Amino acid sequence: MSKGLPLIVTRPDPGGAATVSRARAVGLDARHCPLFAVHPLAWTAPDPAHFDALLLTSAQAARLGGDGLARLAVLPVHAVGAATAEAARTAGLSVVEVGATDGQTLIDAMTSRGIERILWLCGRDRTRFDARGAAISAIACYAADAVAPPDDWPALIAAPAVLLAHSRRGAERIADLVPGRRAHLTLGAISCKAAAAAGAGWGNVAVAERPDDAAMLALACALCHKG
């Protein structure tokens, strides 16, 4: 079976390496090209009695939250995506809701049920949400810093290929690193916001059905073999 177009996976590790492994397992010619490096930040867990719920929009918060997570274990966790929920459970947290779309949709659902004091454990660079009248306290427990692309990046993007953008910020970074001719490249985005952040000029832009890696892999299969 043909491997189709090369697949360029740009998300930071450990997620990036996992995506590459899954893609290769289904026969794709996946290239490991992380454009960010993730690391924990120092933070202090607040008194959980001041909150009704803990919001997690990325698995990195649960993976890199460290010892402070134990103090927050009494709070019910509302997580965006199955991977985030799994990481939260592994960290000893209690997940009560898994959002299937994005952070704003999950916040809308939470506030509609009267959840008004929300602690959001997140990254240093984060999306802005409409709080819908609730009090959302954001605490950054990790950061994703841009890193130089691998040495073979110019050669990879010079030929037809499929690039995966697992976040809005990731899409912006890809766009910065492909500033000129793009019509021979296809972009697979995790959300409409990520697709918009990548700008124009791509040969094709497609959005995953859900904001998770399984949906991104299904999209990659379709795009690589279509190409």
Image (cartoon, rainbow, N blue to C red):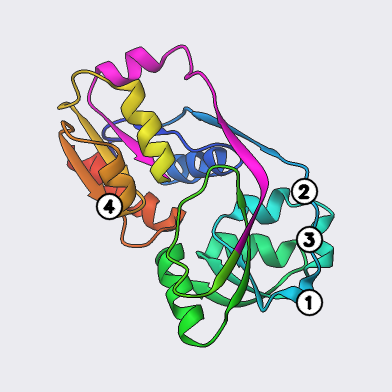
Q: Which residue is mark 1?
A: 49
Q: Earlier in the sequence, mark 3 or mark 4?
A: 3
**Foreground residue, 158 or 167?**
167
First along the sequence among labels 3 and 2: 2
Left or right placement of residue 64 versus residue 9 in this view: right
Query: What is the number of the mark on residue 43?
Result: 2
Q: Three-letter amino acid code at disc 2?
A: Trp
Q: Position of residue 18 (x, y in %)?
A: 55, 44
Q: Residue at 51%, 65% (x, y): give it.
A: 80
Q: Nearer the viewer, mark 3 or mark 4?
A: 3
* Gap between marks 4 and 2 measured at Cα: 34 Å
Mark 3: few/some/many CA within 10 Å (<14, 14-19, 20+): many
Indicate the quadrant where residue 1 lies: top left
* Numbered range of the magenta stretch: 137-166
Mark 1, other Cα within 10 Å: few <14 / some 14–19 / many ≥20: few
Residue 214 lies within the magenta run: no
Residue carrying label 4: 207
In the picture of the structure, the residue carrying the numbered disc 3 is: 69
> Residue at 43% of width from left, 70% of height from top?
100
The span from disc 3 to disc 1 (Cα, nearest Å) is 14 Å
